[in-house]
Image (cartoon, coloured by chain):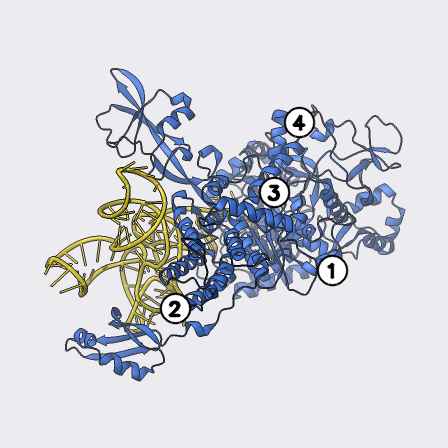
Chain colours: A blue, B yellow
Amino acid sequence: MLLYDHKAIEAKWQQYWASHKTFKAINGGNHPKFYALDMFPYPSGAGLHVGHPLGYIASDIVSRYKRHTGHNVLHPMGYDSFGLPAEQYAIQTGQHPAVTTRDNIARYREQMDRLGFSFDWDREVRTSSPDYYKYTQEIFIMLFESWYDKEADRARPIEDLVSRFRESGNTNVQAATEDDLPAFTAEDWNSYTQQQQQEILLNYRLTYLADTEVNWCPALGTVLANDEIVNGVSERGGHPVVRKKMRQWMMRISAFAERLLLDLDDLDWSASIKEIQRNWIGKSVGAMVSFPLEGRQIDVFTTRPDTIYGVTFMTLAPEHELVDQITTDAQRDAVEAYKKVTAARSERERMADVKTISGVFTGAYATHPLSGEQVPVWIGDYVLAGYGTGAVMAVPCGDERDHAFANYFANQEGMPVIKNIFEGVDVSEEAYTAKDETRITNSDFLNGMSYKEAMAAAIAKLEEIGAGKGKTNYRLRDAVFSRQRYWGEPFPVYYKDGLPQMIDAKHLPLELPEVDEYLPTEDGAPPLGRATTWSWCTEENKVVSNDDNRDCVYPLELNTMPGWAGSSWYMFRYMDANNEDEMFAQEAQEYWQNVDLYIGGSEHATGHLLYSRFWVKFLYDRGKVNVEEPFKKMINQGMILGESAFVKELEVEVEGSLEKRFISQGVNAKHLNIKSGRKLHADVSLVNAQNELDVNGFKAWRTDHATTEFICNENGAFKVSREVEKMSKSKFNVVNPDDICDQYGADTLRLYEMFLGPLEQAKPWNTAGITGVYGFIKKLWKLYHNEDGFSVSDQPASADSMRTLHKTIKKVREDIENFSFNTSVSSFMIAVNELTTQSCNSRQVLEPLAILVSPYAPHIAEELWSLLGHDESICTAAFPEFEEQYLVETSKTYPISFNGKMRFTLELPVNASKDELETMVLANDQVQEQLAGKQIRKTIIVPGKIVNFVIG
RNA sequence: GCUCGAGUGGUGGAAUUGGUAGACACGUUGGACUUAAAAUCCAAUGGACAGUAAUGUCCGUACGGGUUCAAGUCCCGUCUCGAGUACCA
């Protein structure tokens, strides 16, 4: 084979790897383990574009490198195959989502197989497969049967809690629950009915049913989690979202807030993702303070108890439950009117418009717990019902929002003059929000204290008089876990007397029922409400018809689980993917531990990456796994952007009537009578590297524009304009990896994707640039061939060639360790260019070179390896070791600078001392020339680096 | 608004601890081969100025300052872009 035929070579080796199971990972053995994981894809109908494989290529390079360096590598792939698009498609076409999903997966698989990934496909998982989701259901049951012990700071079995209740009631139990659960004694507990006991336990379980304000998306017919909403509309589809009260399954992730925050420190993740998670968890340390009011009390959370004497008024959220009770008759009409107005404003309006200040005085006065003063109580929508207690103590001198509110309502009834408690600070114009630079004044016992001292003293005093206590608040809310959808995991739950009951894990999976349509029922129940066989028989332990009237038959839950359920634990399933008896064997997990390298997009920062950390901590507490974090190191690959092509369309007036014209980029349009213009996307496949449009192709594609006249440039070509945008079908700028593989091959595509730039950066795709790496591959091939065919000599290589080789070994090893793949590709190019110049065809160099490139371009490497006479796959070859001796040089090219400016270079002995260097350099003619009689004021010589003269 | 990150040729991007800015590619231009095209190969390519030329000088890493023998790299200020967040008390 003289010519490099990428199609034949790549097909041959892909087949070889598949039939030999080259990448099958074994659990155990003497080699150190390495677990490289990609975020598994949702198999969409559009297939892969060139942006998708970027991360897969990077993880594949690392995986192949780790195999070469003697690691046992786990590198699996699977599909996050429950999700909305398949269901939307089902609604439109009636095709079962399972069918759509299966077809899409087949296409993804085909595309991935062409790229030569070293996945162990025997471990594939699909979240929508009952073999998999039965364990997702099992974890749900485990969560239901657990509570969070704050004292031990971990999750525990619920039986444990029950026995505590039986012995001593709930007064000594510190559990993560909603606030203010009524206290009961052991006698109380034991006197409760089964039903009452279950209702109480529901308040403690890690997954529980609750009536909560949820984000309801009418267009999608489902609720959405906070992280599924972007700018007040749904992340998918951009539909409006409204608040609605619904009974939903919730996940008590808030119990884990502190651990989720703390353990971030030890993760090798990007600073930005960690920061996003920190903000999302939103820890704030402060105090709860109670303000009595006519036998009731208003509780507030504040991060600034040091400013307690600066309280000028209080503000409640309009939805606050006390509002109706405390409002005076005189203010009632105004308060009612305001409540009406704010309730009508959608969440989105409220968010978009944060500048408008609004509020109403309730007429009520609370009592300041320390000073005893009367403090007017207002309502205002700048206070959020959902955070803290839904009420604030307003300190205008130290808080901008309070200051703005006080200013806006200054001189009105119920708005006193702003109290100032900061020494020597003027707060008449704006609030003083700095903490550390002043002392407290006008504050009784806090006078003269700093922020820190006053914080501690105020909390101590409040605790002493029973008016408050130190408290830490988190922004992180419990997660809504119910979705009113069809294509998700069914809950293993049936209802008996309105109380949820778990199906025993041994009867799982509870498989999705068939439905006639994938829409909600007429009375608004989720799609599962359409199933006629969707009841649970507790005697037969199976799903039975809804018509079954026996006493042992109960209705099943109609909601399904959200997309993040299956993806929260899949990294463990890969460790023992075909286990039919349990989710994974303990030994398998103990062997593989957790993921050493996780590669995926940063868009999952507050969804998948937070929820999976939560589930892993839970599984750890319950002894299922021995690690607390799923992903030790993570890299977030940047998006590959598309280069869209645009055709400019003008509307011109010709003899009194309006006509359309397409005009080429760079053509002067002054002679036309232009009325308006716009640009249309042109499919990038119709545009060549010179930005010239295939006009006939365009006309055939956009038949609606077939008759429009094209105004071409002087060469008769029609040029489009280019713009970088997100790669997507709707922008007609999608580049398909299959096309690239056909034309250039997978090795070239892999190299080119890496060559584009640093993995983590977003960058535009430009197919034209691929010829550079394609040329490299061909030059690499030629190194091993002469006119007659394969030809490698057994003669030792020259010193130059050995230097080139070892320089490259060093660089590539460093680059892979640092995930700097783009610079490796450059150094391969340099190596091949140099070896070509050196006419090197020595086995001594070409054999290790094949191994060096094999993680990046595995097909050509395998082919060369086999041509070199090896029977085994190159994957088993040891990665070349770098040997310093080949890089040792006798001389070094020194830059000689004058006043910091490099003037020329000199070859000087590498081992010369400072003094020797100085003597040699000064003896040089060029130096004397540069000096031109000027004096040397200072000489800086750094051996191995530089020589610099300061002259003048 | 706040938080984080980033600004280097026409383009993607290189550049250990401060030590020869622009590696490697793309594109462009010129040339070779060819009836022609493609492919391939060779040469030039940050800008300005001077010179027939080899070459030399000056300016250049968003902008303005500073530290240093020496700054893309360190410090201060400004601007722009991107990401996250959005009244979180």
Residue named by callout 4: A519
A58 shown above or below A195: below
Residue that sits furthest to the front in the current view: A788
A264 shown above or below A717: below
Mark 3 touches mark 2? (CB < 8 Å): no
Of marks 3 and 1, which one's residue comes earlier in the chain?
1
Q: Of the residues shown, which amino acid type is indicated by label 1?
A: Glu
Residue named by callout 3: A385
Residue at 57% x, 54% y is A278
Mark 1: which secondary structure?
A: loop
How many neighbours does mark 2 have within 10 angstroms: few (below 14), some (14-19), or many (20 or more)? Answer: some
Residue named by callout 1: A151
Q: CA distance from mark 1 to mark 2?
A: 67 Å
User: Which of the labelled discs sits on residue A800, or is there none?
Assistant: 2
Mark 4 touches mark 3? (CB < 8 Å): no
Q: Nearer the viewer, mark 1 or mark 2?
A: 2
On the image, the x and y values in percent for residue A719 come to: 31, 34
Query: What is the quadrant of the C terminus of chain A in the image?
Result: bottom left
Could you confirm whether marks 1 and 2 are on the same chain?
yes
Q: Chain of mark 1?
A: A
On the image, the x and y values in percent for residue A277 come to: 57, 52
Q: Is residue A508 left or right of residue A891?
A: right
Q: CA distance from mark 3 to mark 1?
A: 29 Å
Q: Chain of mark 3?
A: A
Of marks 4 and 3, which one's residue comes earlier in the chain?
3
Q: CA distance from mark 4 to mark 2?
A: 71 Å
Residue at 37% x, 26% y is A696
